[in-house]
Amino acid sequence: MSLKSERRGIHVDQSELLCKKGCGYYGNPAWQGFCSKCWREEYHKARQKQIQEDWELAERLQREEEEAYASSQSTQGAQSLTFSKFEEKKTNEKTRKVTTVKKFFTASSRTGAKKVAQEKVVKQGQLGRERNADNILRDLKEIFTPSWELASPTEVLAGKLKEIQEAKAPSPSINRQASIETDRVSKEFIEFLKTYHKPGQDIYKQCKLFLDTMNHKRDLSIEEQSECAQDFYQNVAEKLQTRWKAPPEKVEKAMDQIEKYIMTRQYKYVFCPETTDDEKKDLAVQKRIRALHWVTPQMLCVPVNEEIPEVSDMVVKAITDIIEMDSKRVPRDKLACITKCSKHIFNAIKITKNEPASADDFLPTLIYIVLKGNPPRLQSNIQYITRFCNPSRLMTGEDGYYFTNLCCAVAFIEKLDAQSLNLSQEDFDRFMTGQTSPKKQESDSWSPDVCLGVKQMYKNLDLLSQLNERQDRIVSEAKKLEKDLIDWTDGVAKEVQDIVEKYPLEIKPKNQALAAIDSENVENDKLPPPLQPQVYAG
């Protein structure tokens, strides 16, 4: 079986990790495959469409209500004084042009008289329509009100009173520890903002205003609270870049500190809230992982050999980091745990294979680490990071890459089947029901009378066989390298010979040296003899 077919149930193309809108950022299953930016755009489009539909429904219900009142007036006449007062106010309101939703649906002093008149002249069905209309209009008013901006003094005071009441409740040591951590983070945040001078004061005021606003908006759904936090992150980042001209690295540091300050205080309210099914999902994932305790590294094609002590230490550290994620309160710290876990996985693969790990090796190993560690409240932590982390960290960088792979690993575990593990459906069902396990099948092949030394001997023989195969592979590669070197040498020699034959080298004889003028030239007899001195008498 080829490596590709073995990995058919686990392999994830890296392009599948990116946003399905094609923007180039990392997507997320919690955002239906979009990145944070594209998801918010899609969410706002759907929200605006829902607002428009609610608006049309509210107008229709209002018209039906007015028609019902007019019909009741024609049948009952002006006998009821209460109804007359109501109708008079109703007529005055018709003459006024409504330009905004807030003006159109603001509760007025006529509510009491309106209810009295309805009890006398309107049928039960009309009362139901009025309640539906009031509820829809009240929701529309809340939607058009800015999510985290200025709040009324009464609402802020109510939020403060609620905090005081909660503070008076008996708190265990965990609450005292959280309070100590909150104070420490607040002091660090103030010290950090001192380096920003005037912008730091403005940032601190905005953070306090945001926290006060969130305190009296805890009745909102967790998605709406997440939207408020994301809007706040975006507004502060834009101010740092445009108004105060802060460089990108300084903006990133400031946003990290702002997230730490805010989420340390909001953690107990927004992490795994009772209004969501996060806890139910946590229990389902934990139960699923416990049922898959029999999955072995070989089934997942995990390229990690835990027999090596260094690799075993890396696996233990990776499991510790993924479990430690639940103890952190800030989304960035939880992401840091995921990143540390992933780096330990890459190191374990590198030590085992003696070469850098690939993405196809990383994802199966991450799945194995999650199955072996069974991290607590895994879905709650993923949802918390998705909802309240600075979106720039999830869209780019190594943190976003590792977090996206973790989401893929959890999704794979939830959908894991026999085909994914290259098992028959019968064996898979037997493993899931606990009738047998892969480890039990290995032990069944041995006789109960065989001592542990014999088992260890055969285990060592199997290891030696693997080493022998590895050595044969190395020898084969070495011979191939030797043949390549010989072929290269012959090729170079042939090229040199061809050049020599094409351009032959002509060696000329050495030129003779010139003889001195006064020396006797005994080699050439054709020259006249030298002059001899002669003596004349006289």
Image (cartoon, rainbow, N blue to C red):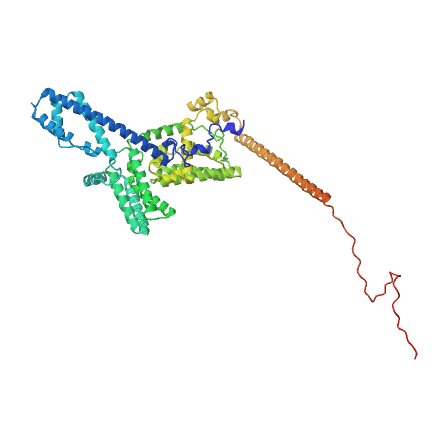
User: Where 445 falls versus 351 (above or below)?
Assistant: above
- Looking at the image, the residue that sits furthest to the front is 538
Q: Out of 32 and 375, give the one closest to the viewer.
A: 32
> Residue 320, can we see it?
no
Q: Is residue 456 left or right of residue 15?
A: right
- Measuring from the top left, give residue 26's x and y in whole percent: 41, 36
Which quadrant holds the N terminus? top right
- Looking at the image, the residue that sits furthest to the bottom is 538
Q: Out of 98 and 303, give the one closest to the viewer.
A: 98
Q: Is residue 294 left or right of residue 198?
A: right
Q: How many marks?
A: 0
Q: Residue at x 9, y 26 (%)?
A: 84
Q: Is residue 138 left or right of residue 500?
A: left
Say which quarter of the image contains residue 89.
top left
- Measuring from the top left, give residue 312's x and y in whole percent: 47, 37
- Measuring from the top left, give residue 206's x and y in whole percent: 27, 44
Q: Is residue 533 left or right of residue 85?
A: right
Q: Out of 20 and 427, give the one closest to the viewer.
A: 20
